[in-house]
Image: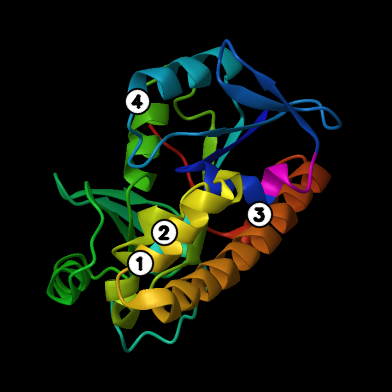
Amino acid sequence: MVLLILTGIKEELSVLLDQHPFEFEKDLRVYRSRQQPGLYAATTGPGVRHPGRVKKMLEELQPDIIVNAGLVGILDERDPARPGDRLKLGQVVKSESETIFPGGPGRDTLVTVDRPVHDMLDKMDLAERYHARACDMEASKILELVGSIKALQNHSFVHFVKIAGDRPEEAALYEYEYMLWDWPYKGMFDKMRILLRFPGGPGAFFKLRRSKARALRGLGAELLSTIQAILKFDGIPRNLGSTFIPH
């Protein structure tokens, strides 16, 4: 069995790379597990920025299971989900074409958008138009890519580990989330410069850091648990939910 873990950005993948030994293979730009044969991990870039590279990876590896893991934006401020909580998806919608991808088991609808959504009115519009609970920038694009490869059609499964990240009331903070990307790899001077220039001041900066850390802890725990369950079952146990068959 070949199991491929895909996240949008390195920050999301780091929750796995920090816990499991991987070796980077430059030709496919993919991480290969040193301990578990058939386990791979990679990033797609925000919004699957380079679909050709991701498609080449899928064609070469021909994974039986693709796990797309990452943080999503909650759309309704009345939603009880907190950063770190997991969604169970029964439907993914591509906002651009309104294409619906059914899956499950799960009750939540995730809508994939082409750009980050921070405005509360835009979030409300997405929630109402698509009856969606959250939004991301990768899910429907990954389903389309897998479904476009003949060798993977009706053979490979896509499982989603989607974790609540930002909430509507935190929109003003998460608009500047990009300033925290690759934080562990930044030098001390760059960190101090970002801290001092962060919109809203250091208090807003640390509030965002705490929220992100809580969400990433939830992502790490759920992703590791999911990988263990899949490897033990040699497939996707039905109780995991959020599973789709692209075609």
Left or right, 64 with respect to 102, comes to right
> Circles 2 and 1: CB distance less than 8 Å?
yes
Q: Reading the chain from its start, which is encountered first: label 3 or label 1?
A: 1
Residue drawn at the location 34% of the way across and 72% of the way down: 173
- The C terminus - image quarter: top left
Residue drawn at the location 52% of the way across and 46% of the way down: 182
Question: In this picture, which residue range is highlighted in magenta?
Answer: 16-20
Q: Amino acid at mark 3?
A: Leu
**Residue behind mark 4:** 50
**Residue behind mark 3:** 223
Does any portion of residue 222 appear in the rendered image? Answer: yes
Q: Nearer the viewer, mark 3 or mark 4?
A: 4
Q: Reading the chain from its start, which is encountered first: label 4 or label 1?
A: 4
Q: Residues within 10 Å of mark 2 (few under 14, many from 20)?
A: some
Residue drawn at the location 45% of the way across and 15% of the way down: 56
**Residue behind mark 1:** 198
Q: Nearer the viewer, mark 4 or mark 2?
A: 2
Secondary structure at numbered mark 1: loop
- Per the model, the C-alpha gap separating discs 4 and 1 is 30 Å
- Which mark is on residue 194? 2
The image shows a total of numbered marks equal to 4
Secondary structure at numbered mark 3: helix
**Residue 143 or 32: which is nearer the viewer?**
32
Can residue 241 be found in the magenta stretch?
no
